Amino acid sequence: MAALASAARSRRRLLPYLNRLLHSASTTAVSPSPSTSRFLRHASPVPCTPDHSPYLRFPAARVSTLPSGLRVVTQAYPAATRMASVGVWVDAGSRFELPGTNGTAHFLEHMAFKGTRRRPNAQALEVEIEDMGARLNAYTSREQTTFFADVQARHVPAALDVLSDILQHPRFPEKAIQRERGVILREMEEVSLFHEFAVLYLSGPSDLDSLLYYLRVLNSILVALLIGHTIVIKVQGMMEEVIFDHLHAAAFQGHPLGDTILGPEENIRSISKKDLEQYISTHYTCPRMVVSAAGSVSHDEVVDQVKELFTEFSTDPTTADQLVEANPAIFTGSEVRVENAELPLAHVAIAFKGSSWTDPSSIPLMVIQSILGSWYRSIGVGNCSGSSLARGISNANLAESLMAFNTNYRDTGIFGIYTTAQPDTLHDLSRLIMAEFRRLASQVSETEVARARNQLKSALLLHIDGSTAVSENNGRQMLTYGRVMPFLELFARIDAVDCATVMETAKEYIIDKDVALAGVGQLTNLPELSWFRSETCSDDDFTRRIFFGNAK
């Protein structure tokens, strides 16, 4: 008890000093007092733009294009670990599926590891991978599909052989198709079950038997009992997946980009071997594929191996850009609301039309995302956050979490705010969020833009902390940009974004623009979509549009 009392006294003495230190940034930056100068020896309380060049001179990415149109990109970084990552990035995802076949791309991802002509079943493939101490994985997004392996450097040729084999000679046995059909249907059920589990877990159930029932269904009893926060994180991740599926459905109505990646249940039950083979022959073509390797790799050796192994893919010159141009995605201002009176928290996403990967506005929108920031009540730094939105939400106790997002596609994008909150705070929370969106178009300081640029650059550097991330970054950039953008160039583009650029971009993408809205939970206090649309106008814009527009 004495120790606790002593600690409390120490905190009481320390907190006023910290408060003065945090809120005297402007004066401290000019002439730091002797008592605080040691804290500023290596940093300033005022954000600035540093010179990154000494830290960004990574080995250059090398690119070769084979006669077939297949591209190979390698980067010998990080090489010291003697590990490597190699993968195949395909310019094909759920948006390229034909009507009635939504879910095929994801189904194919599951079937890729079920055996080939030379590796007759999944067990043979798994044993080979495990004997190398490697890791083989895949994922599907709305525009891309990826198959990759993490291996020791000496096993790169074997990994390339496996990847080429599973993509060129898949067997698709009927028993495996039926088994994976069940697996995917269980994935869909899991999302639904986690939705129900969130209601039970987050509302603090008093009935332990009910809690254990849900834990058994989710096959996570031990994890939940021993590491309870793991379940909370997984529940939150599942809810985000649900919300963003609804948001895409609202933002891109009637377009494949608005469909889920998993696909509807009726499609999963009907997808056949013929559908899978047709999808591969149509979309897995050399001009739409990139082999990316990073870590302890030799570019010339990888190119020679790819030439030898990747020989049976179609050379159809049709590009993803041509397919997108033939069926462009149109952003629609609409909403999806799922009322659930039992869910203790409301989950809401508010979004605007964003930019494509190659649009000049993509970098300013990344900076805007950083300005809006993210915040979670459990972290407890809302009052000290660099995000004015996070500070306002924390001070007014309006939400449990906040996350700005910015997703790019080939011809469009989507950016906005995802938040979780108590149902009775939704109206005030919505007012604050929309006011912050409007503020970005008129009142942005150079200080907060500089801070946002630095946070963005730090996040980008943290993303390439290993060969897997470097390989993924290079493969994705080759598909989206047609080249690998050096970090020196990327950071120079970020540093060129000033407050005037931010305000100009916000005016273009936010002011008087349509809004897409998705919500799950108790949504009685969530304003109507028309209210959100009206809140995108500043007072002057609203007056001009209503009165002068009517006069015309």
Image: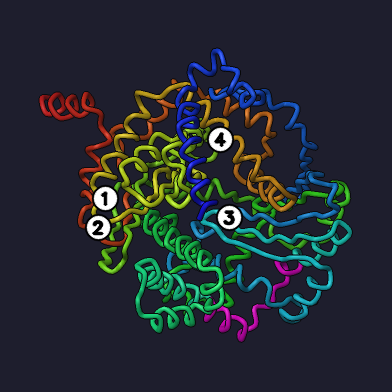
The span from disc 2 to disc 1 (Cα, nearest Å) is: 8 Å
Give the side of residue 185 with respect to residue 487, left or right: left
Residue type beneath disc 1: Leu
The residue under label 4 is: 455
Q: Amino acid at mark 2?
A: Leu
Q: Position of residue 427 (x, y in %)?
A: 23, 47
Label 4 neighbour load within 10 Å: few <14, some 14-19, many 20+ = some
Q: Give the foreground label among 3 and 4.
A: 4
Rounded to the nearest angstrom, the CA distance separating label 4 from label 2 is 33 Å
3D distance between C-alphas at marks 3 and 2? 34 Å
Label 3 SS: loop
Pick the residue in front: 97 or 529. Answer: 529
Residue under pointer 1: 426
Give residue 254's position: percent from left, percent from top.
35, 57
**For residue 178: magenta?**
yes
Q: Can residue 176 be seen at all in this image of the molecule?
A: yes
In the image, which is nearer the foreground, mark 3 or mark 2? 2
Q: Residues within 10 Å of mark 2 (few under 14, many from 20)?
A: many
What residue occupies the far front of the structure in this picture? 2
Residue placed most toward the observer, 153 or 455: 455
Residue that carries the numbered disc 2 in the rendered image: 523
- Mainly helix, strand or loop, the magenta region? helix
Nearer to the camera, 533 or 173 = 533
User: Circles 2 and 1: CB distance less than 8 Å?
Assistant: yes
In the image, which residues are magenta? 165-183
Q: Earlier in the sequence, mark 3 or mark 1?
A: 3
Label 4 amino acid?
A: Gln
Residue 40 tag number: none
